[in-house]
Amino acid sequence: MDTEYRHNRSTHLLWYIFRNTFFNLADGGQVQNKTSLSNTALLAESKLSPAFTIDLESGEPQVLIIHTHTTESFEPYIRSSFDTSFNYRTTDSAYNVIAVGNAITEQLEAAGIAVIHDTTIHDYPSYNGSYERSAETVKAILAEYPTICVVLDVHRDAIQDGNTLLQPVVEIDGKESAQVMIISGCDDGTMDMPQYLQNFHFACRFQSSMESRYPGLTRPILFDYRKYNQDLTTGSLLIEVGTHGNTLEQVVYAGELVEKSLAETLLQLAE
């Protein structure tokens, strides 16, 4: 096979994959498939139940919320252009993603689901190595509380177009909410993550719950060759709540909606 033919064939394959990257879930929501797995196969997988159940009677923690990029913060108010002096990171837990995690925790506890919200800062003073540090945090907590089935790594996204902030919002019950995106990783054979489809089953159940309950709240699940410590449980997901263009008020409200939907999903998985 000559070089030019190989190049053309590879280009055509990539074009075909990304042209067909989105598909709808049966019960609401979408998936953006950026892997070589077929949409047909993933749609079939999306209908399977998560690999875990929730024990509401034990009183032991079932959910862990962490933040690999703990200092990620948000806009102080709605505006259309960047303030170049604003770095969108702070160690102040009242203004970073810990505030979103607090909103999530409150809703889970209100539903009777035991949760641990770990507020360890993993990305300061050094950003490099954040995932290695958060993995050690998760492993230590799982060793102490083996009843934990679900680990949510809560972040905020960063989307911009030149000097314009992109602020994905949806109005729900008369109030602006940031939109939410689940990232579910896929193993390309190099990540030692054999249970990645079990995470995906959970992601799809959770996505459909959010979108059917609050239409427009979600962006499509990103299913891609990424690890993000999702090898540690069969219920490990990364959640992007809003972007750096959203306000803290918008993302805290999104956190409340996320966990009302998560609580609904987990209660359906109760023993």
Image: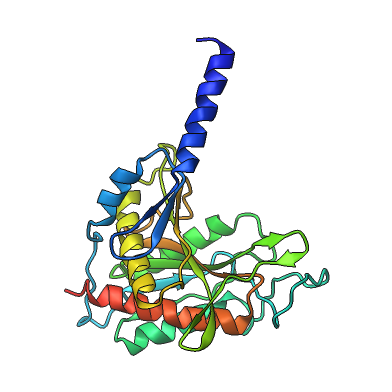
Along the horizontal axis of the image, is 156 left or right of 258? right
Outermost residue on the top side: it is 2
Along the horizontal axis of the image, is 63 left or right of 246? left
Residue 197 is situated, as x and y percent measured from the top left of the image, at 32, 50
Outermost residue on the right side: it is 85
Residue 65 is situated, as x and y percent measured from the top left of the image, at 44, 72
Give 228 or 23, whichever is nearer the viewer.
23
Residue at point 47% right, 30% down? 13
Residue at point 74% right, 66% down? 164
Answer yes or no: is residue 195 visible.
no
- Quarter of the rendering occupied by the C terminus: bottom left
Residue 152 is situated, as x and y percent measured from the top left of the image, at 43, 67
Residue 21 is situated, as x and y percent measured from the top left of the image, at 45, 46
Answer yes or no: is residue 58 visible.
yes
Quadrant hosting residue 213: bottom left
| 155 in relation to 253, above or below | above
Residue at point 31% right, 86% down? 111
Coloured how?
rainbow
Query: Number of callouts in the render?
Result: 0
Residue at point 46% right, 35% down? 16
Along the horizontal axis of the image, is 187 left or right of 271? right
| 257 in relation to 189, above or below | below
| 266 in relation to 174, above or below | above
